[in-house]
Structures are given as structure tokens and as C-alpha cells.
């Protein structure tokens, strides 16, 4: 029996490497998105603390206008930072979606080449079976021809 050799194996190998690279890029983009979401969560926590502080400042017996103004300004600045962070999260989500699409496309291409390889192997097995059958027929006819 001959040895099976897929003639487009090098293309399949390249597709596997590209798929692996795309998976790594997707994972990195997803990690970046999670980090951005963590930053926003920290900002939200800090904003709640500022609002709690503002509430406490207003409930004190002696009101300090300067502290209240500073606190209000800090809250406004924090809200602006949170808006900017939301934009960064949105951009990271777009990047993750783009990387996911690339990864899915490469996975489909690799799967296509794997199917082509399987079909080529099946064809090879059929050819080998036909060659073996032909060889057996030749041996049989030679044996009967000798008698």
C-alpha cells in the first residue's frame, strides 16, 4: 500500500497557524475589553463614594461651601471620565467583534481544507483498493493461466 500525501498540506498548515494567531488576537482583544470594563467598574465605585461623601457633607451641622463645591466638581469630572471610559469600552467591543469575525472566517477556511484532505484520503483509499483488487485479479489469472 502506498503512502498518503496530501498535496495541499502546506496550505492547511498555514491555515492552522493563522487560526491559532487569530485566536490569540481575539483573546488579547477580549482581555483588553475586560480590563476597560474593570476600569469603568472602579470609576463607578469611586463615583458612588464621591456621591456618598457629598451626601455626608450636606448632612453635617456646619456646612462648608468650598468642600461641597470641590466635591461637586469632583463628581462632574468623574462623570466625564466615565463617559470617556464608556467610549473606550465601545471601541474595545468593536475590536473584539472584528477579531471574532476574522477568527471565525479563518476557522471556516481551515475546516474547508480539512474536509478537502479527508476527501483526498478517501479517494486515495479507493484508488488503493482498486489497485489491490487489480493486482489480485492479475495474480488469479496468472495462477489459472499456469494450470
Image (spheres, rainbow, N blue to C red):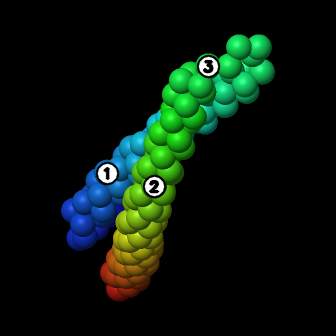
Lower sequence index among marks 3 and 1 = 1
Q: Is residue 73 visible?
A: yes
Please say if 61 is above or below 137. above
Residue ID at (51%, 32%): 74
Which one is in front in this view, the residue at disc 2 or the one at disc 3? 3
Q: Residues within 10 Å of mark 2 (few under 14, many from 20)?
A: few
Quickly name the residue at label 3: 64
> In the image, residue 70 lies at what x, y percent?
52, 28
- Whether pointer 3 and pointer 1 mark residues with C-beta atoms closer than 8 Å, the reply is no
Report the front residue among 97 and 66. 66
Please say if 139 is above or below 79. below
Q: CA distance from mark 1 to mark 2?
A: 27 Å
Residue ID at (35%, 55%): 22
| Helix, strand or loop status at disc 1 | helix
Label number found at residue 60 = none
Q: Residues within 10 Å of mark 3 (few under 14, many from 20)?
A: few
Please say if 71 is above or below 23. above
> In the image, residue 112 lies at what x, y percent?
42, 73
Query: On the rendered structure, is 69 left or right of 127?
Result: right
Which one is in front in this view, the residue at disc 3 or the one at disc 1? 3
Number of numbered discs present?
A: 3
Quickly name the residue at label 1: 21
Q: Quadrant of the N terminus?
A: bottom left
| Helix, strand or loop status at disc 3 | loop
Report the front residue among 91 and 119. 91
Amino acid at each position: 500500500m502506498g503512502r498518503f500525501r496530501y498535496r495541499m498540506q502546506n496550505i492547511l498548515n498555514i491555515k492552522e497557524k493563522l487560526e491559532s494567531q487569530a485566536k490569540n488576537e481575539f483573546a488579547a482583544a477580549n482581555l483588553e475589553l475586560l480590563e476597560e470594563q474593570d476600569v469603568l467598574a472602579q470609576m463607578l465605585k469611586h463615583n458612588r463614594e464621591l456621591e456618598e461623601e457629598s451626601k455626608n457633607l450636606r448632612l453635617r451641622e456646619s456646612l462648608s461651601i468650598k468642600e461641597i463645591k470641590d466635591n461637586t466638581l469632583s463628581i462632574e469630572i468623574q462623570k466625564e471620565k466615565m463617559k470617556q471610559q464608556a467610549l473606550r469600552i465601545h471601541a474595545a467591543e468593536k475590536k473584539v467583534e472584528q477579531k471574532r469575525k476574522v477568527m471565525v472566517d479563518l476557522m471556516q477556511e481551515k475546516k474547508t481544507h480539512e474536509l478537502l484532505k479527508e476527501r483526498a484520503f478517501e479517494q486515495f483509499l479507493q484508488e488503493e483498493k482498486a489497485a489491490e483488487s487489480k493486482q489480485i485479479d492479475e495474480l488469479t489469472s496468472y495462477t489459472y493461466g499456469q494450470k
